Image (tube, rainbow, N blue to C red):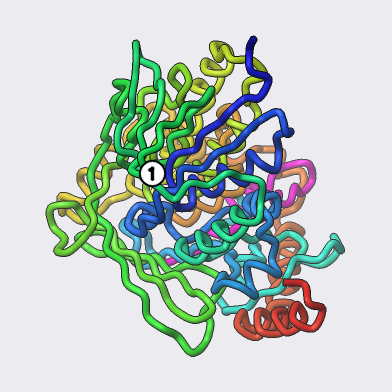
Amino acid sequence: MQRSEFKIVICGGGLAGLMTALALHGALSSAYQIVLIDEGEDADDDLSYGSVTLPTAYDFLRGLGLDEPVLFSRSNTSFSFGSHYVDWPGTDTDWIQCHHQILPVIGGVPLNHHLTRNQRSLAPLLISGVAARHGKFAHPPNDASNPLSRAEYGYQFSAHQWTRLLAEKVQTSGVSRSASSIETVNTDNGEVISLDLTSGETITADLFIDCTGPARKLLSAVGHSFATIRRISLTHSLKSASQLGPACRRVQASAQGWSAHTFLQDSVHTLMIQKDDKAVDATPYALGALDVAWHNNTVAIGAAASAHDPLTPGPMVMLQRDIERLLDLIPVARTFDMEQREFNRRFQNDVNHTDMFANAFYLNEAPTSSFWSEAASAAQSPDLNRKIVQFESRGILTKFDLEPFNDEDWTVLHHGLGRRVARYDLQVEATARLDIDQQLDGMARAIEQLVGRMPPHHVYVSNMKRYFEKQKYA
């Protein structure tokens, strides 16, 4: 008689394993048994996810039980309006790569064309970027007449502290957890049959999920290769801070790579990225992806499936998308052909689009060091070239299927990197140039005035935490 219960075994601790376990447990019925083989946190592996998220993380984290009262009261999480890029090659000024809702359309024509015609800058019209530059923060209100309602935010976080919170959630959930390690992956004809654990137990499953990070213990055992695009090294440090910094990560370029300073409630986390043969006491890391992430009865999630440049929130974007893609395609039977094909198709799209956004940073004129030349060489692609050419030629934002970075992200990036539109849409000439200048000046003034009244990031977070404590939310 066929078993009625469908057993899913998740292999690996850290962010990927714990998030996957909680997401599946929260979404699936009691017909699915979920087992987590928690091999413990590997701090170096979780460094590769970076320290910032996109705004889409808000709903995703709430689904895991990590709402803002928990995140801010029980960890050193802070808000993120984006990242502040400084001394970036090929740019005349620094810029805030900020999160923002749909940009205005004036007279039926996108804002970008008016900026081109009137030779105006985008930055003063981005409330989230202006607030971040001034070290201010407040939650965007629902009132559409308030300029702050156009802002969006993500989070700045410590992977170690989020892992701790997630582990506590797993312990009080219905997930079966084994604090053991995989000793042997037993396979037959390209399929994982069972796992021998260091505890002496042998475990079987209908579906295995590989969250073992760069080790890729399960997918490697069934013969799938990881295609390395380029190699980098990661060095990190943590310095205590008496006061929370701005609601934006500070990313600064150098001849040998770049460094990112993430401002948390009690500290500043610094991640330095260089070429892997140049750094001392650093963790080597290969950027790239598996040829397929789902093979037979085994699925790779997070860094086990693909490794992305932490220059952007891309690594956390991919981890979230991997889990959401898995939830969409959880099998309802013990054959996986359709689910496997669709998962791999969407996985490859997400890998390409996530990498494309980070690669766009490396195509400006750069230092002659091997780090920058290798990054620029790896960044070349017909799709990215099409995006840049179409924008610089006619201000068109080329779109591909279900990209994780939206039109606003790309518009801010193009402007931040100094890309300018050669030809604006002639429909803008239906509105007088002076009228447009007056509208843009009014928008910029309203933003400056509002930001002047906003509280500093550290004051806002302190007041919010006192409110949570008073209400006993956490």
Element on which disc 1 rests: loop
**357 left or right, relative to 137:** left
Q: Position of residue 445 (x, y in %)?
A: 72, 74
Quadrant assignment, res 87: bottom left
Q: Which residue lies at the image location 35% right of the left edge and 15% below the top edge? A: 190
Q: Which residue lies at the image location 40% right of the left edge and 32% below the top edge? A: 202
| Quarter placement of the N terminus | top right
Q: Is residue 184 magenta?
A: no
| Quarter placement of the C terminus | bottom right
Can residue 123 be seen here? The reply is: no
Query: In this figure, which residue is indicated by the disc labeled 1?
Result: 308
Q: Position of residue 73 (x, y in %)?
A: 65, 75
Between residue 277 and residue 135, name the one nearer to us: 277
Between residue 357 and residue 80, name the one nearer to us: 80
Q: Which residue lies at the image location 43% right of the left edge and 52% below the top edge? A: 49
Q: Position of residue 310 (x, y in %)?
A: 39, 53
Q: Which residue lies at the image location 45% right of the left edge and 41% below the top edge? A: 302
Residue range (magenta): 93-116
Quadrant assignment, res 62: bottom right
